[in-house]
Image (cartoon, rainbow, N blue to C red):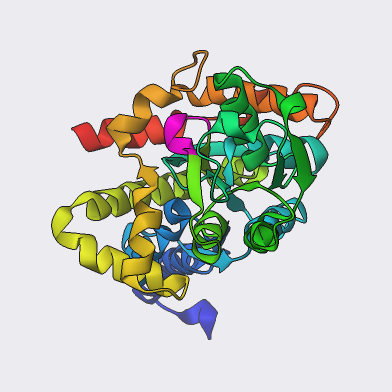
């Protein structure tokens, strides 16, 4: 009977139960981490976001100890999925993040992937050689989106305004067909639509691109404030993986493998994909660091976001100016950069 067990027996059993309890606690902790819901990130067909595919293929998230599930969408659909609460994070431009926040669900940008360096274009039919040649012409673009802002900036830089042209509201993915139909004289679009427009209209050419205004369009990783608060350490690991991706991507010896991985995600050949990558300036940690500083103008993601906010309000995308600074949090990236420098 238990009452008749020796003191030694009770002691040994007590030690055994304690050991089992500690082991159980450790296993519970271990499996609790392992079974945590993966961070769900929406990404779409833009080189700075397709680059995540490198980490996916190489299993770098597992190596870093964070569970991540990337979900592939068309760009607009990825933002809709985020607003619907289906994603913890999503790749968006700094201007579009303000739109989803003001009209749907706020987010916080924790990582600057790149800035558009030529992939966003104004493509004109043969015979139109410059922005000034657009006076009195029709331009097809998706009103309220990045190509619209690009056109207005191009007009401004050439002493013109929106009053000098006629804008034909056109979904971005339909701009190549609209240009080919002759219904417009030029289109404004991002890759791959801008590249397709150049292909389908013989003799067409880009007369203005995002390379002419670096920093107008920053492409970032935005996450929900709730997820950031609860899983800050996990998001920091995601940022660490990104910088591993950047280092791999910027190593010249890896370019063939990089193009193979990125092109396979969007079902084109590596040769076809190479111009897309060239039109995107992927940022290293040190390159991104000064962009995170608060300043006016396009060299700061804050200044760029202010310009986007002014545009969104002027185009009645939303009514009141956004508190754009709340959409940006450099702290995790700066911590990672500091740790990388040690």
Q: How many marks?
A: 0
Which residue occupies the extreme front position in the image?
A: 127
Rendered view: 76 above or below 188: below
In magenta segment, residue 214: yes
Which residue occupies the extreme left position in the image?
A: 253
Q: Position of residue 278 (x, y in %)?
A: 34, 50
**Residue 80 picture quarter:** bottom right
Drawn side of residue 285 relative to residue 93, left or right: left
Is there any visible trace of residue 62 in the rendered image? Answer: no
**Residue 321 picture quarter:** top right
Drawn side of residue 256 relative to residue 31, left or right: left
Rendered view: 202 above or below 151: below
Q: Position of residue 4 (x, y in %)?
A: 48, 80
Drawn side of residue 24 relative to residue 228, left or right: left
Q: Position of residue 84 (x, y in %)?
A: 77, 56
Q: Residue at x 34, y 37 (%)?
A: 336
Q: Residue at x 53, y 77 (%)?
A: 3
Q: Residue at x 40, y 74 (%)?
A: 264
Is there any visible trace of residue 163 in the rendered image? Answer: yes
Rendered view: 329 above or below 238: above
Q: Which residue is more in the foreground, 67 or 113?
A: 113
Q: Residue at x 70, y 62 (%)?
A: 181
Drawn side of residue 286 relative to residue 144, left or right: left
The residue stretch that appears in magenta: 208-216
């Amino acid at each position: 009977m238990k009452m008749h067990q020796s003191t030694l027996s009770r002691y040994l059993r007590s030690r055994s139960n304690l050991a089992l309890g500690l082991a159980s606690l450790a296993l519970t902790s271990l499996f609790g981490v392992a079974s945590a819901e993966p961070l769900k990130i929406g990404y779409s067909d833009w080189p700075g976001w397709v680059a995540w595919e490198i980490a996916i293929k190489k299993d770098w998230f597992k190596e870093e100890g964070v569970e991540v599930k990337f979900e592939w969408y068309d760009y607009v659909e990825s933002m809709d999925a985020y607003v619907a609460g289906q994603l913890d994070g999503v790749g968006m431009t700094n201007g579009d993040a303000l739109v989803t926040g003001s009209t749907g669900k706020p987010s916080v940008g924790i990582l600057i992937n790149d800035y558009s360096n030529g992939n966003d274009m104004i493509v004109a039919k043969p015979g139109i050689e410059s922005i000034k040649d657009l006076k009195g012409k029709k331009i097809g673009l998706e009103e309220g989106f990045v190509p619209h802002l690009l056109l207005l900036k191009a007009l401004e830089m050439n002493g013109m305004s929106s009053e000098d042209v006629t804008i034909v509201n056109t979904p971005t993915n339909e701009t190549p067909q609209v240009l080919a139909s002759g219904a417009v004289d030029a289109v404004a679009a991002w890759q791959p639509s801008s590249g397709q427009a150049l292909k389908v209209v013989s003799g067409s050419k880009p007369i203005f691109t995002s390379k002419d205004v670096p920093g107008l369009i920053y492409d970032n990783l935005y996450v929900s404030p709730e997820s950031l608060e609860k899983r800050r350490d996990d998001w920091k690991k995601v940022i660490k993986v990104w910088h591993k991706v950047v280092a791999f991507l910027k190593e010249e010896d890896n370019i063939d493998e990089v193009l193979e991985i990125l092109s396979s995600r969007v079902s084109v050949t590596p040769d076809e994909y190479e111009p897309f990558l060239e039109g995107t300036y992927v940022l290293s940690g040190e390159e991104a660091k000064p962009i995170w500083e608060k300043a006016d103008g396009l060299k700061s993601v804050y200044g760029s976001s202010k310009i986007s906010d002014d545009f969104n309000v002027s185009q009645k995308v939303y009514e009141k100016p956004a508190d754009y600074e709340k959409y940006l949090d450099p702290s995790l990236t700066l911590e990672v950069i500091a740790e990388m420098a040690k």
